[in-house]
Amino acid sequence: MEDVEDGEEKLIAAVRHIAKSLGRTQTMADDILQVFSSFDNRFFALDKTSDRHQRRRDVPTADPRQSPSPSPLASFDRTLRALESQVVRFVDSNRLIWSDSANAAAFLEAIDDLLDTATDLNNQASPATKPLLDRMDHLLRRCVLRLDEEFRAVIESTQPPVEDYDNDDAYHGGGEEHIPVANPVDTYEIIIDALPPGSVADLNDIAHRMVAAGFGRECVETYADFRRSFVEESVARLGLRPPPADGFLAAAWDEIEEEIPRWIEAARMAFLILIPSERRLCERVFASLPAYADLAFSVTCVPVASDFLSFGAAVASVDQGPERLFGLLDMFEAVRDLLPEIDTVLSDQYSAAVLDEMGVVHRALSASIRRIFMELENLIRRDPVKSAVPGGDVHPITRYVMNYLGAACSRPTLAEVMAEDAARVAVPLPVRVAWIADILLDNLEAKSKIYRDLSLTYVFLMNNGQYILQKAKGSDAGIMLGEDWIRRQNSKLRQWASEYQRASWTKVVAALRMDGLGGAASRSSSVATEKAIRDKLGMFNNYLEDIWRTQGSWVAMDEQMRAELRGGIAEAVLPAYRNLVARLRQAGDARWLLDRYLKYSVEDVEARINELFEGGRRSQ
């Protein structure tokens, strides 16, 4: 084996010597090289640098106003024939050229020689050189077609397959609706090397020759065809369902809302990992060819990026109720956080439009959030006064609005969005929250009028007012409303409690007054005294029983409110009733009246008071 290698080295050295010795006679040198080239392809790589330099040196310079002399044309013809002989065997080969690194290097060098010769010939272009130029162009196109095939083969052989999800845990749903979902990641600071370094270097070599030959866009298309399919399949694996056939405008909000968390996670994966990795790969494959790197990246990634953003734009345009707020806030935050991260990735001339589109979606989501939050005011105003809530309990709209405000105000992003309204004078979120709370109270005042019993009107207002304060206490909504607003609401609660007590218990207390009895209690035989005592006790009993029968199903929304109401009633009624009973017991012979007309003891009355506001109470 060593003898063979020594023989080859000696043969190569001899050929170099012969070529150098006869180099002064260009015709002979070319002929000898042609013979050796047809004999063994090992001689293609013989001193190419000096050979290329020699050929270019031998091309005579001519006055562009004169036709080239036969001599330079003959020289070009011989050079072209030599290059044809070298190139054709590669172009027509059934084996992949890049399966052998030596063949790949020889083919690239032959193309470089061909490009150099084409440049020299173009510099002396004339009608006489047209046939040579046509031959040169035809040969160059054949080379480019083969380069394109090799480019495809290199990508195809090294492009990693998208992970196959055979595990049932990787899917949501069942039957034909299995949606493959990528496993969650803990960090997005990841760059994926999609192709090995050696393949990237090969692709870069090919790209440079295709660009030099004027076929840079074709190279980009070949690259993008493969990488775009990889990107699209990767995105498909992130778990997004395709939009409904009739679009999002006709879809129910719960269907859209179900997609939002998946969209957010997929967008982060795409814009923070997948797309930056593709940018890095383009810059390496098309190294030193920045314009083509930008174009390849754009063709590969812009369609996918636009599809992501079209979902955000569609959701922002859907006209639904206030329940959309939280999904839109989630999307707004995701887009807001992505913008600075991808600013440099999407800043080139071809993909900058995507960055602009993302800004448009960001603003559209912001406008939709403001519109939805302001729509809450209209929803409260339009809420009709239908049937009364049984027992004066908390109205559903009170629960809805206060829970909604509590959830909304806990999102700092909402204040950010409300402050950036450029279309009108921005209203700070605390002011708008106070407006909404006041509108709610006005609506509740209107709803309270539906009760025929004035006492129940005030119980209804107290229940709802207490619920509002309870939800505001210690919450972000309460911070937004402020201490002054909460003090005013507490004052209203006290006022409503006083109005209730006046409407329900003033007549009860009046029945217990001792007016008119004077010293009559000492004249046991007095018919007037007996009748007055009988009437007072009978009136008290009737009032008490009527209140128990009417208010037994009324509700106080929490223990604190029940205790305060019962305490106020007991404070007004029990001392007066206890005083009346005590006076009658001290009236000597009048005590028989107590035995006849006293239906309830003081303890009985207290027990009855402590049973109020329990009926129909719902747990909170």
Image (tube, rainbow, N blue to C red):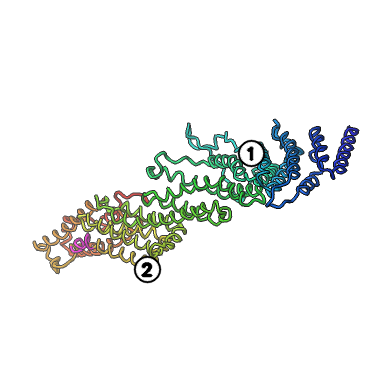
Q: Secondary structure at mark 2?
A: helix
Q: Position of residue 53 (x, y in %)?
A: 78, 48
Number of residues whose C-alpha sits closer than 10 Å to that of mark 1, classed few (under 14), some (14–19) or many (20 or more): few
Number of residues whose C-alpha sits closer than 10 Å to that of mark 2, classed few (under 14), some (14–19) or many (20 or more): few
Tell me the amino acid under the disc marked 1: Pro
Q: Position of residue 386 (x, y in %)?
A: 24, 50
Asked if residue 245 is positioned above or below residue 438 in the image, the reply reads above
Q: CA distance from mark 1 to mark 2?
A: 64 Å
Residue drawn 48% across and 55% down?
359
Using residue 399 as the reference point, say whether residue 167 is left or right of it.
right
Q: Mark 2 sits on what residue?
A: 484
Residue 160, label in figure: 1
Along the viewing direction, whichever of 99 and 179 lies nearer the viewer: 99
Asked if residue 2 is positioned above or below residue 114 in the image, the reply reads above
Q: Position of residue 306 (x, y in %)?
A: 50, 47
1 or 2: mark nearer the eye: 1
Which segment is the magenta one?
502-510
Q: Is residue 504 magenta?
A: yes
Quick check: can you spot residue 597?
yes
Using residue 116 as the reference point, say whether residue 20 is left or right of it.
right
